[in-house]
Image (spheres, rainbow, N blue to C red):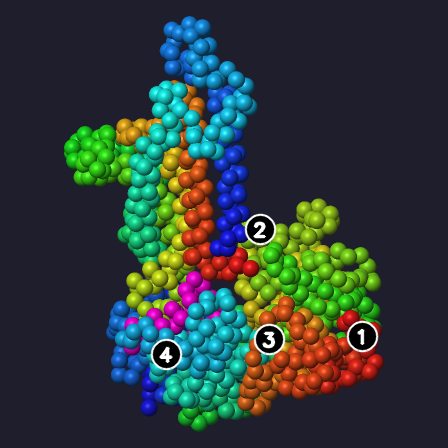
Amino acid sequence: MTLLTLTGLNVSIADGTDRIHAVRDVGMTIARREIVGLVGESGCGKSTLSRAAVGLRPAGVTVSGSVRLDDTELLDLDHRTLAAEVWGRKVGFIPQNPMGALNPVLRIGHQLTEHMRRHLGIGAREARTRAADALAATGIPAPVAALDKFPHELSGGMRQRVAIAMALACDPALLIADEPTTALDVTIQAQIIDLLVTLCRDRDMAMLLVSHDLPLVLQVADRVDVMYAGRVVERAPSTGLAERRAMPYTAALLDSVPTLSGPQPVRLPAIGGTPPDLRAAPRGCAFAVRCGHADAECATREPTLQPVRGDDHLTACLRPLEAKTPVIGEDETAPETAADRAVPVLRATDLVLEYRVPGRPSFRAVDGVSLELHEGEILGLVGESGCGKSTLGRALTGLIRPAAGTIEHPAGETADVQLIFQDAKGSLNPRRSILDVVAEPLLYAGRGTTRERREEAASLLASVGLDPEVLGRRAPRRLSGGQAQRVAIARALAAKPRVLVCDEPVSALDVSVQAQIINLLMDVRTATSVSILFIAHDLAAVRAASDRVAVMYLGVVCEIGSAEEVLGAPRHPYTKALVASVPGQGGRLRASLSGEPPAPGDPSSGCRFQTRCPEAVPECAITRPPLVDLGPTQAVACHVVAPSRQATGVSPS
Amino acid sequence: MTLASVMRRAARLLLVLGAISIVTFGLLAVMPGDPALALLGPGATDAAVAEVRASLGLDRPLIVRYGDWLLSALGGDLGTSYQTGQPVVTSLADRFPLSIELVLVSQIVALAVAVPVGLWSARRPGGIVDRICSVGGLGLLSLPMFALGSLLVYVFAVTLKWLPATGIPSFGDDPLGHVQGLILPVLSLAGWQFAMYAQILRGEARTVLAEDYIETAVLKGLPTRAILLRHTLKPASLSLASLVPITTGELIGGAVVVETLYALPGVGRLMVDAIAARDLLVLQGAVLAVAVVFVMLNLFADVVVRWLDPRIRSHHAG
């Protein structure tokens, strides 16, 4: 039975004097109890579509076509009626960003009950009871106590549970979830997706799951719609889509996502180019300019959704692929890199890093870490939020003074570590041209005349794949996320660093762009022999980029080794759980790790991981396990896996 | 707020007051003009001036006079006016209530108008309310207070004769007359306050309205009223809350102008008259009293900001 029917839906957004045609002629149905995935790169129109699908029309947004929920035409209803009868009541909305989606100055209880009281006509007391039930249903421990808290007192995962409870509160028939797990750690992400699917099944809800993460969606959705440039370009059941995909764009999305299985690629297959500007309707297929399979007809005739393999598998493509054809990227043999010689350029020994807050005991973010970074290697550093990986990265650049331990530069002087941020755009001075941004480190190094510095900056821009003629005079705000990260890398390289510390350099980027940036970092390493510390929470991205990987948990390194060893055959129970939480490994998604890390800075004795560890033995509560070598490159800090008969030289004190 | 932090603030308050009393005392000492001469008039003989100076204690060194003043101030005695012989504390008690009333009512009027106007402008940027308020606001901000006051007097008192131009009966004698007498001074004072608050709130509210949690609230099906008043106003009024006490200080300065313009017996007039008469102790007492009010207001604003933003509350809690 159909719950939601979209017919001929068009959405355009006013942009100055132009209009962006964000959604173009989309038809879609969602049946009761069905989970439908909506996938595409940012700017493809999926978020806009998900809002128009519940009748939301903010100022400047024009929606035409038809949106029927049950038998009601939502586009005929005004804002006031939609608010009173549809939103929060028949449709629950789960926002993307749990940090920003709850009002910071209102208590959880208030935010959970206000719409219940309005929609269900119940009193404050009953609403509170129901709110506590809803929180309990989303797995929040001590739900009644949580009602009196403010959002900032909860972790990101807990906040997202609150947002889910808010959406469930009035028993809607349809959930709209816009990137519900994107901002979360991988273990928490698995828990939240599990929770959403279970809730939908238990409560007979349908869900539109909007995400950029195709492997994730394939694991939980019944059906998937892939969107590109405002249109649905492929629609198919999730099962088997990875092999049966027909549209080259879908194939490219699938291939550019790094995985944890299969051989480690030398280069990630990336989709070149960028999505089209939707101010004017594209001529022909909107993907044709980025498509390796396009021909002359693709450039002139825009295809419509047609059945391709059976009635339930449709694609808008004139040249659909055969089942399972490799699309982009061939395996290459890895070039010889300096990393193979293992010459240390940066060595941290028993590093302790603390944050001091006046009037409180200082908070120990990193507690005894010893690491070596070799010349020309990419060392991945992974772990959940709050594990201390960013703090460690900053300390290695010299921005944070260690409370104990040492940082040495065996190969040279100290001022040659550069930092790359997650928010690349925010790290570029908005008032300077891109060329000047890149030239600035050259100025401080006292190199050349203004003209020579500009020339060098231009060649640096070219080396990161940007055209200095086109982009050099522009302001940073006019760059895309991927371009901004390229500029940041060029600027870092201008200082001729021996070490680049990249703190979540790709986590804000689309998968296709993510692949481009990872490839660029690997190229930069090959070309300049720079060593890179690649900090990320995305294990697959780390595996794709890194030679070696270190895993951190609550301020300590619990496992380190080659990327193949650590992520392919993890030994530490925490690494195993992390790896098992990553979607796209054949089986259904498993929330392999329950609970959240205990409050950092509250070190219990013994192993940090014991409170969540499925394999803990009594000794884990007593002594802290040192890092013990398991082989020439791999070392693990665990009493169960590696009883510490011979502690290595790099063990924490 | 914990007892310790209250004590810390109280100690800071005393320090501030001490510093202010020293600065005003010093300023008055170097200011040209002589209280004795002001008292006696221009024709006074040198001998008469010297005699009066001696009787007022002005012949003693500055430091001794300050110490003397400080000692009795600590005992609650701020001295007597050279001019009238009335205790300074009594003059302040006579004059302060009206000034406080003027400033408080102006603030309330300014905020009461600025909040709906600011929120509505933010909700419909470029709409009719927004345009009227940004043009009118700019006008009010650029108009000096005495000019606005004179304009109001001309329109409402001289031309329309709806309201009195000067003077105010006490509330006890004539409640209606008191309220009528208050209207024009309050409007003169509140004009630019309102304009500034509306502009600031509009900017803050626009930022808040673009936040994800507002979309969440909209898609929970909340009515627009709840979204603006609960979800938008509270986070958007943070900077307003820290601004209000600062502008209250400005308002006290404004009260000097307005009280002079409308011939109101407030503390502003008291200060102006005291300066003209070189009546040091009255001026000293008035400045100190204003400073106390100003510092207390800042303390109060801190409490309000903590209430508005729980993140600040818990950050300082430990």
Q: Residue at x 43, y 72 (%)?
A: A147
Q: Which kind of residue does numbered mark 4 sit on?
A: Arg
- Point out the tag, 3 or 4, that comes first from the N-terminus: 4
Helix, strand or loop at disc 1?
helix
Question: Circle 4 is placed at which residue position?
Answer: A130
**From mark 3 to mark 4, how far is it between C-alphas?**
28 Å
- Residue at 73%, 47% (x, y): give it: A446
SS at badge 4: helix
Q: Nearer the viewer, mark 1 or mark 2?
A: 1
Quarter of the image with the C terminus of chain A is bottom right
Query: Mark 2 highlights which residue?
Result: A432
Real-space Cα separation, disc 3 to disc 2, in angstroms: 42 Å
The residue singled out by tag 3 in the image is A597
Nearer-N-terminus badge (3/2): 2
Q: Nearer the viewer, mark 3 or mark 4?
A: 4
Identify residue type, mark 1. Asp
Q: Residues within 10 Å of mark 2 (few under 14, many from 20)?
A: some
Q: Which mark is residue B111?
A: none
Mark closest to the chain's N terminus, 1 or 4 = 4
| Amino acid on which the number 3 mark rests in the picture | Pro
Is disc 2 placed on a helix, strand or loop?
loop
Q: Secondary structure at mark 3?
A: loop
Whole-percent x, y for residue B54 in the image:
47, 14
Q: Residues within 10 Å of mark 3 (few under 14, many from 20)?
A: some
Q: Is the Cβ of the residue at disc 1 closer than 8 Å to that at disc 4?
A: no
The alpha-carbon separation of the residues under discs 1 and 4 comes to: 60 Å
Answer whether residue A278 is visible to the viewer in this image. no
Callout in the foreground (1, 3):
3
